[in-house]
Image (cartoon, rainbow, N blue to C red):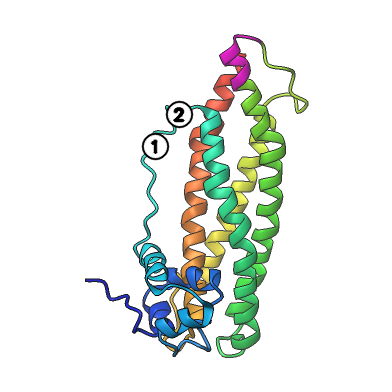
């Protein structure tokens, strides 16, 4: 039997299931300062149906995100579409949200926890800037090039000359930036001491650490699909067209 009920307070739910914070934020429900409000009352104040919100909360708490697709067998176009819809869109919405959460934690708790929040902020903002530039380069340069090559291969014709000379040139840049992002993720984990939440941390701080770990996991999967599946297959395809 689920422990998520409309009689529990928003703060209790957010503390026990940090992944639900995204749901509360999406519906503009205050889970931190207004966390003592029962979920039923919070739904009433926002004009939401409790049973519908509970479904969203249960899904977030259960972490129902699975992907059993064999991406080595799928088309490169399908893989690119998956990467953009699943990982790029996630980053485009999540990076600004995490920046706001970090700014809130820094303004309220930096002195309480030494320089940890501020250090996390500096590392994260550098990562965010690099990732946002990275996504643009992939979507505007590398991905269209790979899709053009695959379309040419299916049509049995030669691919048009790449303005970057070879698909391997933007791939090398992307791999270098992946390595840089991986280094930033490692720094975030080190500064946060493996995301060990202080016992007296507020719900926003707890959710921040949880969501940074989710970001790390998503980026690891994202980079894996590109470095280990998309890029080698694209390089091999170029030799055929």
| Image coords of residue 224 (percent x, y) | 48, 43
User: Is residue 193 visible to the viewer in this orientation of the structure?
Assistant: no
| Image coords of residue 56 (percent x, y) | 41, 65
Disc ID at residue 194: none
Residue at the spot of label 1: 69
Please state, as top left, top right, bottom left or bottom right, where the N terminus lies in the image.
Answer: bottom left
Q: Is tag 2's residue or tag 1's residue first in the polypeptide sequence?
A: 1
Residue at the spot of label 2: 74
| SS at circle 2 | loop
User: Is residue 2 visible to the viewer in this orientation of the structure?
Assistant: yes
Residue at 68%, 53% in the rendered image: 132
Residue at 40%, 74% in the rendered image: 50
Magenta stretch mostly in which secondary structure? helix
Horizontal side of 168 relative to 34 (left or right) equals right
The image shows a total of numbered marks equal to 2
Looking at the image, the residue that sits furthest to the top is: 156
Residue at 63%, 80% in the rendered image: 104
Q: Is residue 161 magenta?
A: no
| Image coords of residue 53 (percent x, y) | 42, 70
Q: Which is nearer the eye, 200 or 22?
A: 22
- Crowd tier of the residue under label 1, counting other residues whose Cα lies within 10 Å: few below 14, some 14–19, many 20 or above: few
| SS at circle 1 | loop
Q: Which residues are magenta?
A: 150-157
Please state, as top left, top right, bottom left or bottom right, where the C terminus lies in the image.
Answer: top right
| Image coords of residue 120 (percent x, y) | 60, 72
Q: Give the CA separation, mark 2 to mark 1.
A: 8 Å
Looking at the image, the residue that sits furthest to the right is: 163
Instruction: Answer whether labels 2 and 1 touch (C-beta < 8 Å).
Output: yes
């Amino acid at each position: 039997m689920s422990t998520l009920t409309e009689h529990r307070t928003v703060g209790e739910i957010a503390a026990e299931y940090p992944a639900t914070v995204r749901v509360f934020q999406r519906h503009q429900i205050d889970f931190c300062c207004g966390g003592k409000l029962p979920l039923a009352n919070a739904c009433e104040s926002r004009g939401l149906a409790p049973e519908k919100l509970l479904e969203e909360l249960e899904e977030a708490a259960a972490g129902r995100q699975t992907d059993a697709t064999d991406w080595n067998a799928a088309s490169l176009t399908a893989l690119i579409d998956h990467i953009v819809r699943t990982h790029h869109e996630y980053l485009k919405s999540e990076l600004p949200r995490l920046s706001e959460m970090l700014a809130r934690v820094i303004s309220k708790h930096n002195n309480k926890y030494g320089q940890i929040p501020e250090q996390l902020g500096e590392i994260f903002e550098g990562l965010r800037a690099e990732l946002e530039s990275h996504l643009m380069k992939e979507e505007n340069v590398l991905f269209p090039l790979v899709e053009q090559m695959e379309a040419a291969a299916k049509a049995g014709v030669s691919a048009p000359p790449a303005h970057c000379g070879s698909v391997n040139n933007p791939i090398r840049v992307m791999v270098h930036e992946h390595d840089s992002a991986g280094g930033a993720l490692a720094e975030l984990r080190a500064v946060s001491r493996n995301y060990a939440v202080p016992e007296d941390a507020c719900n926003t701080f707890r959710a921040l650490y949880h969501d940074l770990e989710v970001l790390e996991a998503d980026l690891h999967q994202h980079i894996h699909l590109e470095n280990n599946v998309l890029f080698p297959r694209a390089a091999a395809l170029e030799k055929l067209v």
